[in-house]
Structure formats: structure tokens, C-alpha cells
Amino acid sequence: MNPTTRYATAALLALSTTLALAQQSLDSTATARAPSNAHVLTKLELDQLLAHPENLVIIDVRRPDEVSSIGGFPVYLSIQLKDLENSTAWIPKDRTIVVVSNHAARGARGADILASKGFKVAGAAGTQTYEKDGGSILHIPIPPPVTH
């Protein structure tokens, strides 16, 4: 095999490997972002659930900085989406669950996870969407640092 043929063969091999890895990455991203089966709750539906807090658990799957900067519901379990599957042992199974995020996309993925584990999931909700639709969420200002 002459040097030009070897170079061309190596280049094709490198290109095909790169394309295969790119396709694999696209496939895993598509799987991770597959459409959710979770119901996205309307403001009215969420208000009806919030009217009976004794039957409800709200799980907020956002990062703490999102909760503090955007606001949230008064009482909730904070479990980031990446930790949800490993946290199911301490989530009550005897209550209806609403999973919240900013606009319900991560919440819906969290709702799917919990429903697949046998939890009674009402659906997902977005705190920003809920507030935009006239709902009230809490905005808790971050206290200034303590100086002595």
C-alpha cells in the first residue's frame, strides 16, 4: 500500500469513527429528551391539588439557585432530577405527587420516573408558567452575608 492510500485509509477510518460517535451521542440525547408521558397540570388543576396539602407532595427538581432566584412553592422536597431515581426510598407513596420545574419539562421527566416506580403522580407543573397564569409562588430574598 503506497503512502497516499494509507493516508486516505486512515483519514476515512478517523472520519467514520467520528461520525459513529456523533450518531451515538445524538441517539443518547434523543433518548434522554424523549417525549414525556406526564400530564402537564393547568393552573386550575394545580390549585385544586394545592387546596388539599395533606394529600400532596411537591417535588421540585430544579437547582437551589433556580428556586432562590425564580421562586417556588411554600413546601416541597428539593430533589434534583439527576438524583431522583436514587431518592425514591424516602418519598411518601401514600400521597399524590406533583413534580415541578421552571416550565414543566424537567418536571415531566421526573414525573415519568416516579410513575414508573409506582408512585401516584398527578403530573408536572412549571413554577414560572404557573405564576404567569396568575398563580402565586413564593419569592424569598436571599439574605445578605453576615458581617461581624
Image: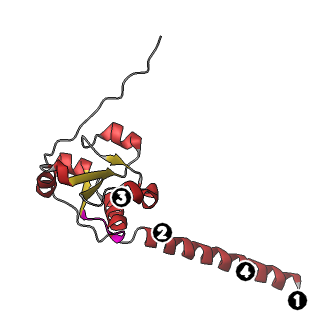
Marks 2 and 4 sit apart, C-alpha to C-alpha, by: 24 Å
On residue 13, which mark appears?
4
The reply to whether the magenta stretch includes residue 36 is no
Residue stretch rendered in magenta on the structure: 116-121
Q: Position of residue 5 (x, y in %)?
A: 82, 85
On residue 28, which mark appears?
none
Residue nearer the viewer, 96 or 141: 96
Residue nearer the viewer, 26 or 48: 48
Kindly identify the amino acid type of the residue bearing the numbered disc 3.
Arg
According to the picture, the residue beneath numbered tag 2 turns out to be 29
Q: Residue at the spot x=29%, y=57% of the render?
A: 104
Kindly identify the amino acid type of the residue bearing the numbered disc 4.
Leu
Which comes sooner in the sequence, label 2 or label 1?
Answer: 1
User: Which residue, as the protein is rendered here, is positioned at the far right?
Assistant: 2
Which comes sooner in the sequence, label 3 or label 2?
Answer: 2
Contact flag, marks 1 and 3 (Cβ < 8 Å):
no
Kindly identify the amino acid type of the residue bearing the numbered disc 1.
Met
